Amino acid sequence: MPKRTDLNKILVIGSGPIVIGQAAEFDYAGTQACQALKEEGYTVVLVNSNPATIMTDTTMADEVYIEPLTLEFISRIIRQERPDGLLATLGGQTGLNLAVELAESGILEEYGIEFMGTNLRSIQQAEDREEFRTLMNELGEPVAESDIVNDLEGAHRFVEKIGYPVIVRPAYTLGGTGGGIVEDEKDLVEIVASGLKNSPVNQVLLEKSIAGFKEIEYEVMRDSNDEAIVVCNMENIDPVGIHTGDSIVVAPSQTLSDRDYQMLRNSSLKVIRALGIEGGCNVQLALDPNSSDYYIIEVNPRVSRSSALASKATGYPIAKMAAKIAAGYRLDEIINPITGTTYASFEPTLDYVVSKIPRWPFDKFNAANRKLGTQMKATGEVMAIGRNLEESLLKAVRSLEAGMNHLEIDGASGLQDDELQAEIKRADDQRLFYVAEAIRRGISIETIWEWTKIDLFFLNKITRIVQIERLLAEQVEDVELLERAKKLGFSDQKVAELWKWSERDLEGFRRDNGIVPVYKMVDTCAAEFESETPYYYGTYEEENESVVKEKPKVLVLGSGPIRIGQGIEFDYATVHTVWAIKEAGYEAIIINNNPETVSTDFSVSDKLYFEPLTVEDVMNVVHQENPLGVIIQFGGQTAINLAADLADRGVKILGTALEDMDRAENRDLFEQALADLDVPQPEGRTATSEAGALAVAEEIGYPVLVRPSYVLGGRAMEIVYHEEDLERYMTNAVKVNPQHPVLIDRYLTGKEIEVDAISDGETVVIPGIMEHIERAGVHSGDSIAVYPPQSISDEMRQKLIDHTISLAKGLNIVGLLNIQFVIHNNDVYVLEVNPRSSRTVPFLSKITGVPMASLATKAILGEKLSGYGYETGYLEESQDVFVKVPVFSFAKLRSVDITLGPEMKSTGEVMGRDSTLEKALYKGLIASGMKIPTYGSVLFTIADKDKSDALPLVERFYRIGYHILATEGTAKFISEQNIPVTTVNKIGNEPPSLLETIREGEAQFVINTMTKGKQTARDGFRIRRESVENGVVCLTSFDTAEALLGVLESMTFRTESMPSFKTKEKVTI
Amino acid sequence: MKRQLILEDGSVFVGNGFGSDKETEGEVVFTTGMTGYQETLSDPSYCAQIVTFTYPLVGNYGINRDDFESIEPAIHGLIVKEAADYPSHWKTESSLDELLKAKDIPGLEGIDTRKLTRKIRKHGTLKGKLCSADIDPGEVIKSLREKSFPHDQVSRVSTKNAYALPGRGKRVVMIDFGAKNGIMRETIQRGCDMIVVPYNVKAEEIFRLNPDGVLLSNGPGDPKDVPEAIETIKAILGKIPVFGICMGHQLLALACGADTKKMKFGHRGINHPVKDVETGVVAITSQNHGYTVDENSLVGTGLKATHIAVNDGTVEGLRHLDYPAFSIQFHPEATPGPEDANPLFEQFMSLMDTNKKEGLQHA
């Protein structure tokens, strides 16, 4: 069946902000889909609220709407655009849920819009637990015993019948929000309640636990002609029990015999045929390690995180093919873009091993519960390719950038055996490393299997790694052994450590002995057909397939896994850089290791090296390609951190010189530079010891802002009000020494401003200035940013412009720079200068129309901005107002405090745009997931120091008709001001206490400010967590609350009685 | 022990030996299946060939008692990137190395198998020798170039004597050119009364057994090496329903006057899409063949191409327009590989049924 010609205009729904469980993979999928549909000549209308994506670039679709992904707004777009078709299966769970809502609202029918790809009925059948189970029973496909319950009572009945442990899965949620494994009555009550709350249909599935079974995934595709294929199967090293998004996964499956493989393949295909999937689909299965028994765990009737991984693991572009299938094509009509000669209707075969390891945010959230279960906690992931499992796994470990260069973590060797055992059994993010430690200690793999149910196959591979470690430690300078170790993926760093050499010496020795990697192609077909795909991975073998071209080359370093503080924004900039390099006539080569992103789509660059971003791995590519230089500005801190080591090895860093970067990042040099340029900054000093820190703080006066130097996303940054807090910080939060100094600054309260600029050394272009809603002290990534600034004077604006220009010139910036300012007492102070691409580049690029990353790249490559018609200065501000609202994933991370502070906590962002600030904010807040009812109750629990600041807010809420709830102290204070208030009992007092009020959904908003100190055990913490877990908006900054109030006030009307003639003084407003 | 693979084009791959220490020669081919090594190494169609696996880790789940496709593997050697030291699977009874030792088959591991695969892809199937790394390759290369391999593989793997696999259903006589167990398994599973006969069986003998259908099995090498079978098929065609698989398919073509030709490097793997020309349905199939039926030679033979390979358009299935006979180049019995094509056995069953009902002559 050829392409459908009865459809012209197609609406594509994106997945919205990056949250845990739904990340960059949907930018990759959406981008591919839009491109595929455009290629076919359709008019594509895209809607997504996330500005940080490639898919929302105006070149990706004919019409791009960055609007809230809600029924209200999509309906508006539909009325305006009148599309013929709707493609929603590429926008994650968000897209799917929205599509269901649209269909149910009747608008699709009203406008005759066809649901493309997998139809709605199939989606519901796959997503609704009960319907799915019924279908499986009809097909004779086994599913674990389970029951759907709508209340706790039902849960109890099920457990009485089946017994513990059971798994709780809420219906229609992403990343398993609110689910978990339940071992006892207490957990049952808690988790079922949370699951019911989190499920939009108030349903949870209770299921017999099959923890310990092998977890296997099949990525399958089906077309309208009923042809179905398996693109890739994957085996989780972590057996059933840990969410697949949190599992270490290998592809293809390693421990399945052909019989096992085909049995599960048959089952997967049978299921997607019965469901009538048209496009991509993911089937998760559990296989008994001791028999041929299996269960189907679940089916995702759409493109997913796993399909992004499978696409990168095999080279088969699933999302693109899914879009073509939705457009009517059959698999055997679509050419496989990798080989260019074969068709999409074949099953890729690999001749390498792929490992995926999730990247968790626990380095930022040290209070978080690290135990892994059915609720996903990872923010991102890395993938590595090798010719054996060990190589693939070790490359993945060092791709994580989590401070490990090997299967080893700090602290593991110090554990007692019983502690180690407990850690392994607990199954947290570090289990793999503890397992390696146990093997080092000689604990038998059979015992470890008992504890973990990790297949002996994998445990044997880890044993081999440990054996090589031992041999290396004994046989220093053994060339043959070194080669063996390199083949198994050992890093130079690890070998050097075992030989007690420097890494440089080892690198030299290795090269002298000719031990260098070769690069092999990822071609979907194990070399059976000729391909010209420029997608490579490094390995230690004979034949090198990467042909070096004559053309001058530029190497771009990507930003690695998505983590808090380094999100999809950096991938966005990386992709634009690559495009700009190609445009400028160079060969653009990229190194990156994140399977979710657009930058690792092989069709983006001229050559893609899927490799870890370490000095060793980057240098190997440099030796292979001999590029003119390396661009590091766009890869976030990952790339910046490599700059010095690369330069040291003779690699040319393109753009802003290393010394100048250092002048921005090194405290003392920065201070000097600012002094020279006459740009003020808050008073501050560097300390290299605890005593030094205390002395500095004493001198400049509290409150102070403390942080370690060279960090991204404000890790370990804190505002400290008292000496004792500083002492605690110095002992607990940082390792301080002369190599790792701590920065201490005066904390200035005031309006925070962020500016991004592009400079070629002569011309400094400032596309936009953004004002933050939250005052300085809240991390810029967690603040609501507004463009153009709404509340700063022309004088301040001019100062900002002048300072930016003088900093760009004074620091000899070539490329991008980002500056954070604070306006304090009518003066502008510089907080920090980042000589690189920032988080706000995509946002600003989109709203100002200045292709910032692209222009910066051209400047880096030696072109002049004037040549593109730009002059030094601030571009004319837009008439519309744009806001960038952060999005958090707190619901996924238990025991993390949601209070905003100098440490970044958000995982994603959305954009709101309209003609006034209030309207833009409304959209931004709605898009971020906030519900904004125009009446209801607001609960205040305010620290004493903040009470008087809170009063105007209380009053305004009251005026627009909100009912005020407050804890005793706060309530007393409020009623003294003649505002009616209901007192809510404190935690621990008789019900209804605060927590019940929140749990029962009696408050629509909670406004809570922290008492000083950082003790998470306090009541405030429980209030905030309770709010998050029950989906109640909890605001910890008055600035955010005020912004919200502004929105509410603009939406509502006051109702007031008319003033009586005599009592004028009683009239309010 | 260091072992090497020497190829006729002069290239040498040095790696580690496993399995038997025996020196062997053979055509070096590659298969792209990621699973199913036990089925592959015991598939008689690989007789006298040295098989390279493109997937690097082989032997992960060991060797079990269920997955053999023949009792005596006939391959001349196995080349892998890494042979698993510690297989892990509940069915495992031995390791790959142990099996190869027991069956006296040499293995080579630790070479750049992708490089070897690419070489075969570019140059076509190559003659090669597996031997100790101590041996000087010069002489070996010379002798490989001069050597032409024997043409008697079928006689080596075909059964010497006819035997019965009794059942109560339709009688199927299978001419064994080196049949995989899977073909018998699928036939017996459908209740058939099976009689397996040697490749050089005479037509009269088949008529004497009075079967409802004849199954032409898969087998190693060039179909033109078994001219006696072509004669037999000619004699039974139109008299007994015929179903050919793999070499059986090529022999049916030859018997009808079509031609076969050697492919550059063949189809070996379990991911080959095949399209049914009539229905448009595409199945992912298991394949292992180095020869193919020449499509241009079909004119005037009474044969119609029913299936084609999606990747290269080669003929994958035939049906006779006048006689009850059809054949396929791929393996509907799978093992290893996907079972998408399994319904073709049903097609054979119904062909026999129809034939019986319509009372076509068979004597």
Image (cartoon, rainbow, N blue to C red):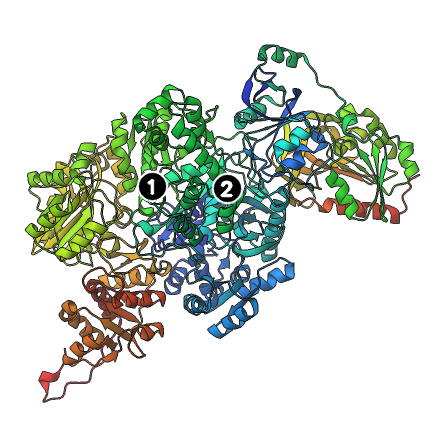
**Residue A239: % across, % down:** 50, 50
Discs 1, 2: same chain = yes
Instruction: Tell me whether circle 1 and circle 2 mark residues in contact (CB < 8 Å).
Output: no
In front of the other: B231 or A769: B231
The kind of residue on which mark 1 rests is Glu
Which residue appears at 31% of the width and 42% of the height? Answer: A573
SS class of the residue under badge 2?
A: helix
From the image, state whether disc 1 or disc 2 is nearer to you: 2
**Residue B307: % across, % down:** 69, 39
**Residue A434: % across, % down:** 41, 45
Vertical side of A690 occupied by B310: above or below:
above
Left or right of A290: which side holds B235? right
SS class of the residue under badge 1?
A: loop
Question: On the image, which quarter does residue A921 sit in?
Answer: bottom left
Callout 2 crowding tier (Cα within 10 Å): few <14, some 14–19, many ≥20: some
In front of the other: A261 or A460: A460
Left or right of A339: which side holds A928? left
In front of the other: A201 or A771: A201
Looking at the image, tell me whether mark 1 or mark 2 is earlier in sequence order: 1
Q: Badge 2 is on which residue?
A: A458
Return the chain for callout 2: A
Return the chain for callout 1: A
Left or right of A974: which side holds A281? right
Vertical side of A537 occupied by A453: above or below:
below
Identify the disc placed on residue A401: 1
Callout 1 crowding tier (Cα within 10 Å): few <14, some 14–19, many ≥20: some
For the residues marked 1 and 2, what is the alpha-carbon distance in whole angstroms?
23 Å
**Residue A127: % across, % down:** 51, 61
| Any part of residue A871 in sight | no
The kind of residue on which mark 2 rests is Phe
Identify the disc placed on residue A1006: none
